[in-house]
Every structure is written in structure tokens, then in C-alpha cells.
Image (spheres, rainbow, N blue to C red):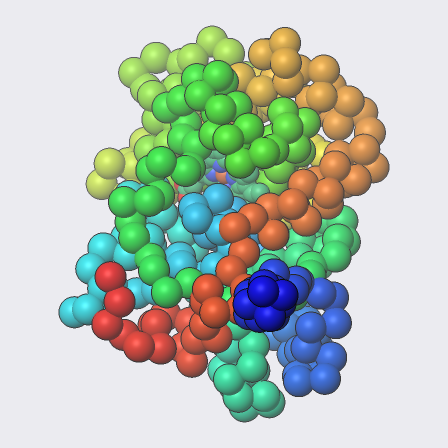
Amino acid sequence: MAYPILFLIFLSLPFSSAKLSLKYYNATCPDFEKIVRENVFNKQSAVPATAPGLLRMFFHDCITDGCDASILIASSAYNHHTERDAELNAALSGDAFDIISRIKNAMELACPGIVSCSDIVAQATRDLVKMVGGPFYNVRLGRKDSKVSDAKRVDASLPTTKMTMDQIIEKFTAKKFSIRDMVALTGAHTIGFTHCKEFSDRIYPTVDPTLHPKLAAGLRQICQNYTIDTSMAAFNDVRSPSTFDNAFFKNILKGLGLLRTDYFLSVDPRTRPIVEEYAKDQQAFFKDFAKAMEKVSVLGVKTGHKGEVRNRCDQFNNNIHA
Ligand code: HEM
């Protein structure tokens, strides 16, 4: 009777022991770190919008069914309406997709068929955050890429600017993030852009009194043609738009945040004390952001046979998947 039990334990080992590790590619792709670092450096130096673009994409990928590069799959005759086609992903930056395909091409030349797209996304995001001034954190490796990508899954996972604080907190706590994690992660809005349509109801027809009047006047100017030119956008952080720092928290305490939900963070009694702490103490913000990003980066990770190492990041290997 002992044999079948032992056999069952043995069979389940490859799945349960398939843990993520910092050294995952040391033997199979020793240049992994260098390839990511060099490509990130070149791309970010040429296109500064890359860092915020990829940071946002990473969050959207991970929060929707895990960090599995499902967001990279392009719709095709076989796969309709993939995650990236969801309305909430419509404004994701083309440069974020571009940096991942550059790195993947370089990986395929150096060590074909070894490195997953989801590991590239996680590692490149960390390197970019660090490059623009943010904290370092460990990225454990060994994720596999998803075999499914479905736009319908996106709405259920992502917070939106139309939500109340209760609804946003619920989105994060459903994924086991604390309110503190949530506030720290939203500090990502210290870099990047927001398109006018996301805050137009705060400036037209009348100005939301919780917005700083000078910022409101500037935004009304920038966004005046936004319905015709939908690419019009403003910096998320008016003080230091390209540097990852704690200015976002100082801003929102003064009515200098673009999104209504960011304003909520600065007034809700559950979040305001944390915002005040981060506004005073950048190290406290960096420490919590790093910890929370490590947590994001292992959300719903697929290992072993639950995923695959894609040949191309925008296609499943067997293209005929649901
Ligand atoms: C709390 C809930 C959140 C809401 C409602 C929210 C919403 C938004 C919206 C509407 C934009 C503007 C997009 C555009 O117009 O192109 C944006 C930008 C951005 N978000 Fe969030 N976000 C949230 C949390 C987060 C988190 C947790 C992260 C990352 C850890 C993040 C990272 C970013 C970045 C980096 C940008 C700038 C993107 C770029 O410049 O391409 N956001 N967010």
C-alpha cells in the first residue's frame, strides 16, 4: 500500500517544488541580468516614457490573473479580444511593449527558448524603477507565460478612477494587499502621464474645488482640445515628473494630484496618515514600495506545466488557444 502513496508524492513534486529563485537563469542563461539591464538603459535613455509605461503595464498584467505576460498577447484570428484590447488597457504605452520585445529578441539570440516573457517584464520593471531613482528590490525568477489572455478578466481586477475609496480598497485587499501596500503602490503615480479624459470632469465645465486652482488653470489650458486630440496628457507629478520620489504624496496633500482617486487617498482617514508619513519620509515610502512590488511580482505566478516559455511574447506557442 505504501507504493501508490509514494508514487503520488513523487508525481506531484515537479509542481510543488517549482519555486521561484533569484538564481533561476544562472546556469541556463548567465547573461540574463546583463541583457535586461543594457536594453533597459538604452531604451530609457532614448525614450523616458518607457519607465512609467512598463510600471503601469506590469501592474495591470499582475493584478489580472497573475504576472504571466497575458497582457502581451496580441489579438489574432485564433485569439480574439485579448487582455490588451480591454478598454482599461487601451492607453498602455507602446514603448512598454517595445522594450519587452527588444529584450526577448536579445534573449532568444543568447539562450533560445529559456527565458519567459513574464520574467523579462518583472526584471525590466525593477531595473527601470531603479534607473529613474526608485528603490531596488529582489525579483525572483522562474515564472512561466500564460496560455490564456482574455479581455473580459480585466474589469474585474483593476481599480478605476470612477471608484470610491471603499471599492478601491476592496480590489487590493481581495489580492491580499494591505491598505499600506495600496498607498505605497499608488506612489507609482510619481512618474508618467495621464490623458485629459481621465480627469476632464474635474476641470470642465467647472473646476473641482479640491484641485489646486493654479493646477486646474494649467490643465484647462493643456486639455482644451482633448476631445479632438485624444493624445493630450499631463504629467502625473508636477514637481519632478521623471523622477521616482515621494513628491506624489506631497502633491496630493496640496490638491496637486490629477486623479480623483489620488485625491481620495489624501483625505480618507484610513489612508491620509500613511500619505502624510510618506510625504515626510521618502525612505519609508521606498521601503514599503519595494516590499509591495515584490509582493505584486509573485501574484498568481505560473510555474512548471501551468505555463510555457513563449517563443514570441505576443503569441502563444500553440496559437490555437481560447
Ligand atoms: C489605486 C488605483 C489606481 C488607479 C485608479 C489608477 C489609474 C490610473 C490612470 C487612469 C492612469 C492614466 C492612464 C493614461 O491616461 O494613460 C494611470 C497612470 C499610471 N499608473 Fe495608475 N492607477 C492606480 C494604481 C496604480 C498602481 C498600483 C501602479 C503601479 C504599481 C500604477 C502605475 C501607474 C503609472 C506608472 C502610470 C503612468 C503611465 C504612463 O505614463 O504611461 N497605478 N493610473
Of 20 and 270, nearer the camera is 20
Measured as percent of width and height from the top left, residue 11 is found at: 55, 70
Judged from this view, the residue extending furthest toward the front is 1
**For residue 88, above or below residue 96:** above
Residue drawn at x 61%, y 33% is: 177
Please identify the quarter of the rendering in which residue 32 is found: bottom right
Q: Is residue 121 visible?
A: yes
Quick check: 218 left or right of 141?
left
Quick check: 190 left or right of 67?
right
- Give the total number of marks visible in the rendering: 0
**For residue 56, above or below residue 12:** above
Quadrant (top left, top right, bottom left, bottom right) of the C terminus: bottom left
Quick check: 109 left or right of 23?
left
Measured as percent of width and height from the top left, residue 172 is found at: 53, 31
Quick check: 316 left or right of 125?
left
**For residue 85, above or below residue 199:** below
Judged from this view, the residue extending furthest toward the left is 77
Residue drawn at x 63%, y 14% is: 270
Of 41 and 170, nearer the camera is 170
Measured as percent of width and height from the top left, residue 10 is found at: 61, 70
